[in-house]
Amino acid sequence: MVGQSPNQYYDVSGRLIYTTNPVVTAAWTEAMKVAGGGLTARLAQFTQSWNQAFTTGRFATVACRPG
């Protein structure tokens, strides 16, 4: 979700904005809803376990924000 925003953690001048960026806040809120609802595979992204689970179908998707 954050990766699809033109300004994520820094603004165009290089100033940190993650604490005030509503995109970061919305992504965090959504991630906490998912985790709290038990809708996660509980795997760290891009680890050996994650890669194996991804290729064997242990989880179905990676969350993305519609453009």
Image (cartoon, helix red, strand yellow):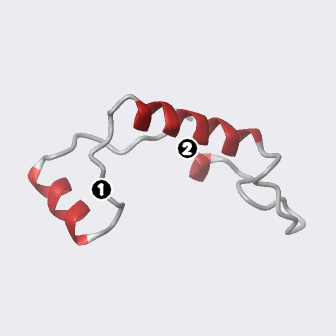
Say which of 46 and 64 sits in front: 46
Which quadrant does the C terminus fall into?
top right
- Residue 30 appears at what percent x and percent y? 54, 33
Which of the 4 quarters of the picture holds residue 48? bottom left
Residue 6 visible in rendering: yes
Identify the mark at residue 43; answer none if there is no mark.
1
Tag 2 near tag 1, CB within 8 Å = no
The answer to whether 60 appears left or right of 15 in the picture is left
Q: Secondary structure at mark 1?
A: loop
> Is label 2 or label 1 in front?
1
Say which of 66 and 9 sits in front: 9
Residue drawn at x 35%, y 61% is 44
Instruction: Please tell me how crowded label 1 is: few (under 14), some (14-19), or many (20+) other residues with Cα within 10 Å.
Output: few
Q: Eyeballing the image, is 10 above or below 23?
A: below
Q: Eyeballing the image, is 54 above or below 36?
A: below
Residue drawn at x 29%, y 41% is 61
Type of amino acid under label 1: Leu
- Residue 31 appears at what percent x and percent y? 50, 39
Q: Separation of disc 2 and disc 1 at Cα?
A: 18 Å
Q: Eyeballing the image, is 40 above or below 14?
A: above
Type of amino acid under label 2: Met
Seen as rendered, the residue at the extreme front is 36
Say which of 11 and 37 sits in front: 37
Name the residue tied to disc 2.
1
Which of the 4 quarters of the picture holds residue 46? bottom left
Which quadrant does the N terminus fall into?
top right
